[in-house]
Image: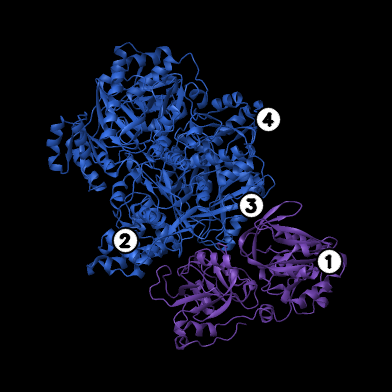
Chain colours: A blue, B purple
């Protein structure tokens, strides 16, 4: 061991994270921050991380020296810089949140006052790229073309600018992530609404610019060191032309339709720009390129790591974030070794001998009222990346990876409405409409005319469509797979067709296709990503399966190995928390001496960093691909329990195909997932559960509901994650509609109808079991009443209001279930508590969303322990999970401002896109910290109250009184609520029900009189929409904090009252954990010595 | 000119077998003619023909550049060689219309396809680009150059890397292999090669003023001439076997360009260049093969690299300033800098393998580089070297006035 320098001489650097995941700022920043911390640690830098996102890998043990789970605000960071005596700060690794915070710290003089140096790209260069006017001026200095544009600070000014530039125009917001507030205006009638929305979003500066619709959109990732050495790492081309946000666009790398002259033009410009702006580290440059000439525009420069740079890193194997961090410390590119070749340096440009395709993952179906149209604003919640050697291959792989039910580029998938219209209006499903058009009467040229998409891509889709025709032509012959010639099968596989699709088209079974494939030796081979296109020998472990490789370059090693299945695309309900689980799992497996193979396809993850595992296979997580790997790699077992529902759903099929599933058996997983089997088990064990019944036919629905005791009822199919297709029905018509939808989602599994309980509490147990015995457990309490999806609920650990008998009963139930299902590994149990009665809602025999939270709060890595149990370690663990000397709160982060029209209300379907986890001395402090960390400002002016049912109005009276009398806030209330408040002598202004009859709720929001809206829905309209939509939506649109749950509102007001006199403490995670007698990591060294089990 | 086509078997007599991308469907070839590549080590790769349907033989080399196939195919440095593209998709943006005779316009780097044959993983039959007038396959067919698609070029390149550069036979796959190999056309690489790639006679390019540069052409890419012309120079482009001493008396600088083959086979040129070194203050700039010639003329040695540098991503570092550049490269031989006399010094080094990338004379305006400052294809980071060279030429020019 090299001796560490004393604290006085070590560099002390603060790294800003990106906070909770939200649309436009997702898991990619966990990847970039984690790589940066690894780079800093190598240089023995004392690293302080500020990031309240507790589900991330960067906030895990063993990375940063100090972690602060607090809001990324200038105030907090100021205090942390001071108490940690930092002398440097990194702003480029936490997305727009970190960049904006850094600019604010510079503005208020904090950095100068504390002598903190901004490492890497200087503040001046950040300003040059963030302020549109400055940006234009700076690029004009070196004669580089940008779109003609006028920056406006008010609507009137913007109107004039529109006239000057002429329609069509594009509106863009400065300092906004993911293109918020941007819109394309084609016709004069659209000008006013677009301007209103642009400025209403709280955006101070809006840009009116020439519209470049139909131009090619290209991105280049460029790197520069302090010595002025520059490289470009990857140029990527958007499938969709300009006009669709790059985060919403299908992207391929490297560029496909640019000749060398164009490619070099953009490369040279990129280097000129990064040098002129003086960026040190990495930046992303977006170009528009005229498809009819070599004319170009520079659209924007992001002077930080971005989603695109994460994609470029994964697409090329070049660790951009790691290198950027080293450059920020003053290294030059040739001084940094190339980790992938181990022989060369970081000064080189990757050469690709494959093609990658990124496809965005939307979850628009989860929101009521949101438009499926995509455009210049980002709405997607995640993305997938496919690697292969032909465009049809990667596109089909990518479409399957989305996990939206499409088995490939299927012309019949969501084939609704007029195909020309579906082409003209870009939506999340347009690629299927293109296939439909090409399978029908339209030529690639005609599709190009309607979509603006380059015909090169369209020919690729045409290729797929024709192969479908060739395969389908075999179906009438009726002899199944036998009719498929090896040549046809090989060609189909090379075009990215799955066995299942080939089977469906030819009328064979999946199994037959697989058998024929194996008979002829048509199997995928693992090809290597080596950054140098095979020019130099490179023993990398970064592999992708393809049918276009003739040989396996990297034969499986003789070591015993474990295959871990990743979580796939981030989506609502499955996000960075499962990546944390996978990475923790890999590390635990490695510790025990096994070789680890990671299978995943999400470019925004740490699990797909090639330095995390022994072998990284970047490919689909599907039955077919896992079975292929099972056969070619020969692992001892497969881990399905860490990646969320995607791998969990494969468990039973894999087990039946002979794959050994590590931990809890696939049969047990099936019992827990299949509502009917699970209900039966609970009955046998004498465990209480809400009344439920099984409905298959609409006809039986009325009686079923009557048996349950009437509406409202909860309807859900089996095998779901995050409440997909789960709904509450308030009447029969609604129930009918829901049953229809559920059947469309999955016809194979029964639909379960449960009595929807109101006014009940919810608790959750996360636990690790070993051969049916619980070895580790933690219990969380929901602040909201039951009925709010557990992913959207605010969790407290340890529980603050749950009586001890309830906790004992819950633990007893968990013990019984673990035993009955002979569990080994992680599981999560959700329970309903009402008047001391504890009933089971559901039990998931896999790692849960809250596992990183409970692990970090208790200081015991639950996944590590679970993994060790699964691999046969028997040593008992001691964990104190109730007796903590602090409280932590996990709170959801919503992205409603991004989802135009979506109703920002909580329900049984999960809607949040991210989470934070914050600590405090008590529940109140932790809650307020968590609120702050999700961007929630505390009220200073006034509160708008709209309190729903009468009982709820009265239950909030005390809190309303406190808001008015103790905090001196002006109260505004909707008529019914005002009446109740007045009756109790609480002062408030009664508002009109609708605009026009006096001041309404909308008016007080628009006039800026309130900075908190508490809106609890009372009734539901015929479409099941709760009332008060307009008020909630307006609050979200103008970014006034909104609370829609009464229990949460009460908790908030009480926390404010209790903490009125004591400011929130700034303490590091380590300081909280040290309060426990058993501190994280003490036993680690001892356990590591044990090695693998016999 | 390319050698005469020889008949191989009855099948290829018919013109109809010379097919290119008339087939529209590159990914899913169904009715296709087989094309095979045999390597010296006995390995065999089977693909589908997409250019001319005839057998050829040559050294098999590869490039890792992801774009720029038009530039690469017309680069005379590849003369006599069978080129393998590492990037799996070839022909995406098509090929522009042929340029008029005598033109040196881009993206063509010479007046014909220079490679002996081409091997790719996928030829694209439906290109998309505003400048495209024909497909890659049509172009290859029209120039009688055979090509194979559907070969796992990564596996092929790995084999070339492990065994060093090898001879290979690219032949139609439907006849007797031995017969095909026997009739395969190749280029004699020691003498014929250098005459094939050099112009017949000297030409003058450019306007009426500006410094005069003698471009010694051993298969120089057109962009060397364009790069000089663009900067206001006048260019005398002369074949390497011309009387360089006589031509050099009227010029302000000499650029020795790139070309194919082993520099040690160009003894005659080395002698001529050594004589040029004697002229006081005559700027001489060597590029690629020109660099190796300068190295030999200086008294150094050259050697064959195991598998050459061929791509658009080669990192080099300037010794002394430690400045780094990404360069375009295409060479199989290198200068051994340790064999240089004392009045020469290494100038650039390859960051990947430490081989020499440039040398310069300590007391004379003579310098040379192994990489391609003229790019095409590839990065233009080192184009400033033309400015450096022309500044020297210009001062000679001014001195004359």
Measured as percent of width and height from the top left, residue A400 is found at 36, 53
Q: Secondary structure at mark 3?
A: loop
Residues at badges 3 and 1 in contact (C-beta under 8 Å)? no
Q: Earlier in the sequence, mark 3 or mark 2?
A: 3
Tell which subunit mark 4 falls on. A
Label 3 neighbourhood size at 10 Å, few (<14), some (14-19), many (20+)?
A: many
Mark 3 vs mark 1, CA separation in Å = 38 Å
Residues at badges 4 and 2 in contact (C-beta under 8 Å)? no
Residues at badges 4 and 1 in contact (C-beta under 8 Å)? no
Mark 3 vs mark 2, CA separation in Å = 44 Å
Q: Earlier in the sequence, mark 4 or mark 2?
A: 4
The answer to whether residue A1087 shows anywhere in this view is yes
In the image, taking residue A973 as reference, residue A580 lies left or right, namely right
Label 1 neighbourhood size at 10 Å, few (<14), some (14-19), many (20+)?
A: some
Measured as percent of width and height from the top left, residue A506 is found at 27, 64
**Outermost residue to the top:** A985
Q: Which residue is mark 3?
A: A347
Q: Which residue is mark 2?
A: A514
Locate the C terminus of chain A by quadrant: top left
In the image, taking residue B218 as reference, residue A684 lies left or right, namely left
Q: Quadrant of residue B83?
A: bottom right
Mark 4 vs mark 3, CA separation in Å = 30 Å
Q: Which residue is mark 1?
A: B397
Q: Quadrant of residue A682?
A: top left
Q: Which residue is mark 4?
A: A9
Same chain letter for marks 3 and 2: yes
């Amino acid at each position: 061991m090299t001796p560490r320098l004393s604290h006085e001489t070590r560099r002390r650097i603060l790294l800003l994270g990106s906070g909770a995941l939200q649309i436009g700022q997702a898991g990619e920043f966990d990847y970039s921050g984690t790589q940066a911390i690894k780079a800093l640690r190598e240089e023995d830098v004392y690293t302080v991380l500020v990031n309240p996102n507790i589900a991330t890998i960067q906030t895990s043990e063993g990375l940063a020296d100090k972690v602060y789970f607090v809001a990324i605000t200038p105030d907090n960071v100021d205090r942390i810089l001071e108490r940690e005596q930092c002398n440097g700060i990194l702003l480029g690794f936490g997305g727009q949140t970190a960049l904006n915070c850094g600019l604010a710290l510079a503005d208020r003089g904090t950095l100068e006052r504390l002598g903190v140096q901004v490492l890497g790209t200087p503040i001046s260069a950040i300003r040059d790229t963030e302020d549109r006017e400055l940006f234009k001026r700076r690029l004009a200095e070196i004669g580089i073309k940008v779109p003609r544009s006028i920056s406006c600070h008010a609507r009137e000014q913007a109107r004039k600018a529109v006239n000057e530039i002429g329609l069509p125009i594009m509106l863009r917001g400065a300092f906004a992530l993911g293109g918020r507030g941007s819109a394309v205006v084609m016709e004069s009638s659209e000008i006013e609404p677009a301007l209103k929305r642009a400025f209403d979003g709280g955006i101070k500066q809006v840009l009116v610019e020439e519209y470049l619709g139909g131009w090619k959109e290209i991105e280049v990732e460029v790197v520069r060191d302090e010595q002025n050495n520059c490289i470009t790492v990857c140029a990527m081309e958007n499938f969709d032309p300009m006009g669709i946000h790059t985060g919403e666009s299908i992207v391929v790398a490297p560029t496909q339709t640019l000749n060398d002259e164009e490619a070099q033009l953009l490369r040279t410009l990129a280097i000129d720009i990064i040098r002129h702006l003086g960026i040190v580290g990495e930046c992303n440059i977006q170009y528009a390129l005229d498809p009819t000439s070599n004319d170009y525009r520079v659209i924007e420069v992001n002077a930080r790591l971005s989603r695109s740079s994460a994609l470029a890193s994964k697409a090329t194997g070049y660790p951009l974030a790691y290198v950027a961090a080293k450059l920020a410390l003053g290294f030059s590119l040739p001084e940094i070794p190339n980790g992938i070749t181990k022989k060369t340096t970081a000064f080189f440009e990757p050469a690709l001998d494959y093609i990658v395709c990124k496809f965005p993952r939307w979850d628009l179906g989860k929101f009521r009222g949101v438009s499926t149209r995509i455009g210049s604003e980002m709405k997607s919640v995640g993305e997938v990346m496919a690697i292969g050697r032909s465009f049809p291959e990667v596109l089909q792989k990518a479409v399957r990876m989305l996990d939206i039910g499409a088995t490939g580029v299927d012309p019949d998938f969501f084939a609704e409405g007029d195909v020309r219209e579906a082409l003209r209006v870009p939506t999340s499903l347009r690629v299927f409409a293109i296939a439909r058009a090409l399978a029908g009467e339209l030529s690639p040229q005609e599709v190009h005319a309607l979509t603006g998409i380059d015909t090169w891509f369209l020919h690729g889709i045409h290729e797929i469509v024709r192969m479908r025709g060739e395969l389908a032509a075999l179906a009438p012959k009726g002899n199944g797979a036998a009719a498929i010639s090896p040549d046809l099968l090989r060609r189909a596989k090379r075009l990215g067709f799955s066995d299942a699709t080939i089977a469906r088209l030819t009328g064979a079974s999946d199994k037959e296709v697989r058998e024929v494939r194996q008979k002829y030796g048509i199997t995928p081979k693992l090809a290597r990503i080596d950054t140098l296109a095979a020019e130099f020998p490179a023993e990398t472990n970064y592999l992708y399966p393809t049918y276009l490789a003739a040989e396996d370059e990297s034969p499986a090693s003789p070591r015993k190995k474990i295959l871990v299945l990743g979580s796939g695309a981030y989506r609502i309900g499955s996000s960075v928390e499962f990546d944390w689980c996978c990475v923790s799992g890999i590390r635990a497996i490695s510790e025990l001496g096994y070789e680890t193979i990671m299978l995943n396809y999400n470019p925004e993850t740490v699990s797909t960093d090639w330095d995390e595992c022994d072998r990284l296979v970047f490919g689909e997580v599907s039955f077919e691909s896992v079975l292929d790997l099972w056969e070619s790699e020969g692992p001892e077992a497969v881990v399905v329990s860490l990646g969320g529902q995607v791998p969990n759903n494969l468990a039973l099929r894999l087990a039946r195909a002979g794959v050994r599933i590590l931990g809890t058996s696939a049969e047990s997983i099936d019992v827990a997932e299949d509502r009917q089997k699970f209900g039966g088990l609970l009955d046998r064990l004498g465990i209480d559960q809400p009344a439920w019944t099984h409905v298959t036919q609409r006809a039986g629905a009325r009686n079923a509901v009557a048996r349950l005791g009437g509406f409202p009822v909860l309807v859900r199919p089996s095998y779901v994650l995050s409440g997909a297709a789960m709904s509450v029905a308030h009447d029969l018509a609604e129930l009918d509609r829901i049953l229809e939808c559920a059947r469309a989602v999955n016809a194979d599994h029964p639909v379960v109808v449960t009595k929807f309980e109101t006014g009940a509490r919810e608790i959750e147990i996360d636990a690790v079991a070993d051969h049916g015995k619980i070895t580790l457990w933690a219990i969380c309490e929901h602040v909201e009443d039951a009925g709010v999806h557990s992913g959207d609920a605010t969790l407290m650990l340890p529980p603050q209001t749950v009586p001890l008998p309830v906790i004992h009963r819950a633990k007893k139930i968990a013990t019984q279930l673990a035993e009955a299902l002979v569990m080994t590994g992680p599981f999560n149990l959700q329970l309903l508590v009402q008047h001391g009665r504890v009933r089971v809602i559901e039990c998931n025999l896999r790692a849960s969303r809250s596992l990183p939270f409970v692990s970090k709060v208790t200081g015991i890595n639950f996944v590590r322990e679970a993994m060790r149990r699964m691999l046969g370690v028997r040593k008992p663990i001691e964990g104190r999970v109730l007796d903590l000397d602090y409280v932590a709160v996990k709170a959801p982060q919503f992205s409603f401002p991004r989802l135009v029209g979506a109703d920002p209300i909580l329900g049984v379907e999960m809607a949040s896109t991210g989470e934070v986890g914050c600590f405090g001395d008590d529940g109140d402090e932790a809650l307020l910290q968590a609120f702050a960390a999700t961007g929630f400002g505390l009220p200073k002016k006034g509160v708008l109250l709209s309190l729903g049912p009468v009982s709820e109005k009265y239950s909030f009276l005390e809190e309303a009184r406190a808001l008015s009398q103790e905090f001196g806030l002006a109260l505004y209330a909707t008529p019914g609520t005002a009446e109740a408040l007045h009756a109790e002598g609480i002062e408030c202004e009664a508002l009109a029900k609708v605009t026009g009859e006096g001041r309404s709720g909308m008016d007080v929001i628009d006039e800026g009189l309130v900075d908190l809206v508490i809106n609890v829905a009372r009734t539901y309209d015929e479409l099941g929409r709760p009332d008060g939509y307009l008020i909630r939506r307006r609050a979200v649109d103008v970014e006034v904090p909104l609370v829609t749950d009464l229990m949460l509102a009460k908790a908030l007001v009480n926390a404010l009252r209790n903490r009125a006199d004591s400011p929130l403490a700034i303490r590091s995670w380590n300081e909280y954990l040290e309060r426990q007698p058993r501190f994280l990591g003490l036993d680690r060294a001892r356990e590591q010595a044990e090695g693998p089990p016999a | 000119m390319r050698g005469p086509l020889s008949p191989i078997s009855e099948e290829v007599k018919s013109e109809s077998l010379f097919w290119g991308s008339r087939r529209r469907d590159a990914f899913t070839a169904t009715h296709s003619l087989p094309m095979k590549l045999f390597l010296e080590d006995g390995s065999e790769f089977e693909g589908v023909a997409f250019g001319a349907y005839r057998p050829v033989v040559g050294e098999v080399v590869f490039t890792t550049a992801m774009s720029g196939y038009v530039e690469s195919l017309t680069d005379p440095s590849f003369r006599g060689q069978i080129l393998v593209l590492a990037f799996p998709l070839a022909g995406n943006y098509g090929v522009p219309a042929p340029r008029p005779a005598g033109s040196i316009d881009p993206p063509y780097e010479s007046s014909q396809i220079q490679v002996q044959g081409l091997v790719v993983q996928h030829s694209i039959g439906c290109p998309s680009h505003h400048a495209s007038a024909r497909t890659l396959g049509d172009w290859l067919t029209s120039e009688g150059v055979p090509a194979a698609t559907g070969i796992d070029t990564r596996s092929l390149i790995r084999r070339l890397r492990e065994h060093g550069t090898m001879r290979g036979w690219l032949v139609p796959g439907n006849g007797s292999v031995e017969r095909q190999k026997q009739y395969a056309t190749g280029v004699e690489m020691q003498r014929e090669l250098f005459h094939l790639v050099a112009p017949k006679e000297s030409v003058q390019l450019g306007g009426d003023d500006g410094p005069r540069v003698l471009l010694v052409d051993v298969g120089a890419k057109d962009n060397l001439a364009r790069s000089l012309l663009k900067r206001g120079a006048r260019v005398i482009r002369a074949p390497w076997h011309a009387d360089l001493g006589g031509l050099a008396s009227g010029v302000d600088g000499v650029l020795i360009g790139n070309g194919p083959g082993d520099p040690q086979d160009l003894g005659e040129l080395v002698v001529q260049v050594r004589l040029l070194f004697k002229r006081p203050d005559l700027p001489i700039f060597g590029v690629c093969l020109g660099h190796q010639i300068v190295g030999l003329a200086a008294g150094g040695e050259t050697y064959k690299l195991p598998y050459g540098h061929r791509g658009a991503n080669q990192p080099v570092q300037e010794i002394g300033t430690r400045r780094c550049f990404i360069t375009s490269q295409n060479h199989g031989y290198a200068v051994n800098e340790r064999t240089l006399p004392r009045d020469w010094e290494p100038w650039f080094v390859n960051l990947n393998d430490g081989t020499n990338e440039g040398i310069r004379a300590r007391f004379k305006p003579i310098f040379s580089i192994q990489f391609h400052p003229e790019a095409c294809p590839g990065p233009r980071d080192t184009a400033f070297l033309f400015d450096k060279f022309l500044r020297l030429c210009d001062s000679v020019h001014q001195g004359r006035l």
